[in-house]
Image (tube, coloured by chain):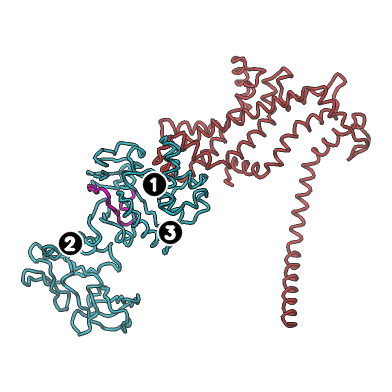
Chain colours: A red, B cyan
Amino acid sequence: MSAVESQSADAKAATSSARSRAIKSLDIGGLILTLITVIFAVLWAFPIYWGMVTSLKPESQVISDTVEFLPRTWSFEAYWHVMVNTMIGRWYVNSLVTSLGVTAITLVTSALTAYALSQLRFPGRTVLWFLILASFMVPLTALIVNHFILMAQLSLINTWMGVILPQLIHPVVIIVYKNFFDSVPKEYREAAKMDSASEWRIFSRIYLPMNWGVTTALSIVIFIGAWNNFLWPFLAVSRPEMMNVAVGITQVNDAFGVQYARELAGAMMAAMLVAVLYLIFQRRVTQAIMLSAGVKG
Amino acid sequence: MSDIVLKDVSKSFGAVSVLDRVSMRIESGEFIVFLGPSGCGKSTLLRMIAGLEEVTEGEIHLGGRRVDQLPPNERGVAMVFQNYALYPHMTVRNNMSFGLQNVGTPKVEIIQRVNDAARMLEIEHLLDRKPAQLSGGQRQRVAIGRAIVRDPKAFLLDEPLSNLDAGLRVRTRLELAQLHHRIKATMIFVTHDQTEAMTLATRIVVMNNRQIEQIGTPMEVYSRPATRFVAGFVGSPAMNFVPIKSITDVGGNASISFAGQPPIHTAVPFGGLPKNNLTLGIRAEAARISQDGSGIEGVVDVVERLGERTLVYCRLPDQTTLVAEDNGVSAIQPGDAVRIALDGNVAMIFDEAGKAYHAVVQQGG
């Protein structure tokens, strides 16, 4: 009995010493890596922290001689101001409608395009595919003047549709979908054909559900992109009641110049929804970013 | 009526021909097995009957109707895929009813048919599971169930047992035979496994190199192979082929001899045989280790003890290898000099092109 005990004690001692040795050998490298990560995390997070703290200070305390990491007096005045004196509610609605619109239409059109390119054989298919790949190379900003003229000619300036339409061009979504549809074993399609399924049924009942993961991931990324988009919504809308949040918060100033706490309170409120979404769908977002970078996760 | 007729069916992918003028007739209710090595075109032929591959030339008729230009769903056939292709996001019930839903079958009838098929295949308790929650054998049943609910004129099965482990394969094979017996539907089964072919088929279609080598019942294909390829492909161990040194006419039949060995009298008629470059074909069970010192000489290379019999791999003086059989309890060791008695009555002769010459079949035999 005691022999067994002493044996097991020996074994424990051996494993623990082995473990401590392992930790020691890892220590220095791990420590350096952790330190670097922490430094970068602080550098990256500090502006957000600073913005949040500033938005919670009374305007009079924003500019001071010393660095104050926490407000001397906590105040929600800036938030109150933004909520009461600006159209932020309306901007939120505009942002929601346009971002959801962009997300839904992009997903539907891209998935259908990708299905056609991946599964159907039709004349001009390769040319179309290369055109889509090529369009990937053109930055949207290069087309922004054309977009503006086009939307103006269609009398869509200052409308939701005018904000949505030019944002629907997402070749990368088509590419990601096509890659996924390509990798579905062809037997599923053949089985569905034997099962008398139409192309629409094969798409909607087999291919799309088999790739729900990628659809959710893409939808989050498109939504966040559309929500944060500034340049086009800024150009397409001049009437305050049609602005989205990202554009609207630039309006949070008054005749007395820049009011930092209010500006930052507006910015915090604009970012809130995306931040919450990101927290909920963290893994999906990472997956989607990897997908669009061409790494299948 | 669900007979299938193939008339001069050819298939090529660009310049590469994979099937060359294949013709055959499959009777209603038959269990046909396409047997052949990889790349012989057997799966392509099945897929052409299914409508998943276009026919380059020729015609396919099913139940008296030409179908080669029809899409797969209008041919009235169902297919079981090698990897089953069960839709992973649907339950077993939805997998089985998907095809019926697509053609607008009334809901009550769908439920009825799915339940009937599930009962027949004993998968009722699995109906609400998804394919990932099933074992290989269960998936196999569901795949068959998906075919059965459609009440097809013919079942097309593309190597459906190849993903199962050995024990399950034997059991599923038996169940498949029972299923065929029960529903009496026309079935076409593709495999490269000759045991599956021998045990399941009413007729085997042996294919090689883009063409049909022979169509016949399992025993015909085994005992009277049409070509040297069929003889070598069907049967385990493979048939022995021994080059013939000289051939003489003894009472109308061919009597042959190898280098320096006593002659062997076969039952193959001498007339009509070419005279040069002939090969004797004889199965291991007709080449017994002789107990009385008669027969041809050989030296034992390898001994395989299978329990009920022993396979003895012998080297003949001309260095040809010949597999002979001995009793289960055999004292033979590698290196032993043995004599092998060949049963000339069941031997066959192949010419240079591989065509087989057999003993004349007796009336009624």
Q: CA distance from mark 2 to mark 3?
A: 36 Å
Chain under numbered label 2:
B
Q: Earlier in the sequence, mark 2 or mark 1?
A: 1
For the point 27% across and 62% down, which residue is it? B234
Q: Secondary structure at mark 2?
A: strand
Image: magenta residue range? B22-43
Same-chain check, marks 2 and 1: yes
Q: Residue at x 79, y 48 (%)?
A: A39
Q: Is residue A78 left or right of residue B31?
A: right
- Please state which amino acid type lies under the numbered disc 1: Ala
Subunit of mark 1?
B
Both marks 2 and 3 on one chain: yes
Circle 1 packing at 10 Å, graded few (<14), some (14-19), many (20+), is many
Q: Which mark is residue B147?
A: 1
User: Disc 3 versus disc 1: distance between alpha carbons?
Assistant: 19 Å
Which amino acid lies under the numbered mark 2 shown in the image of this protein? Answer: Ala
Q: Which marked residue is nearer to the observer: mark 2 or mark 3? A: 3
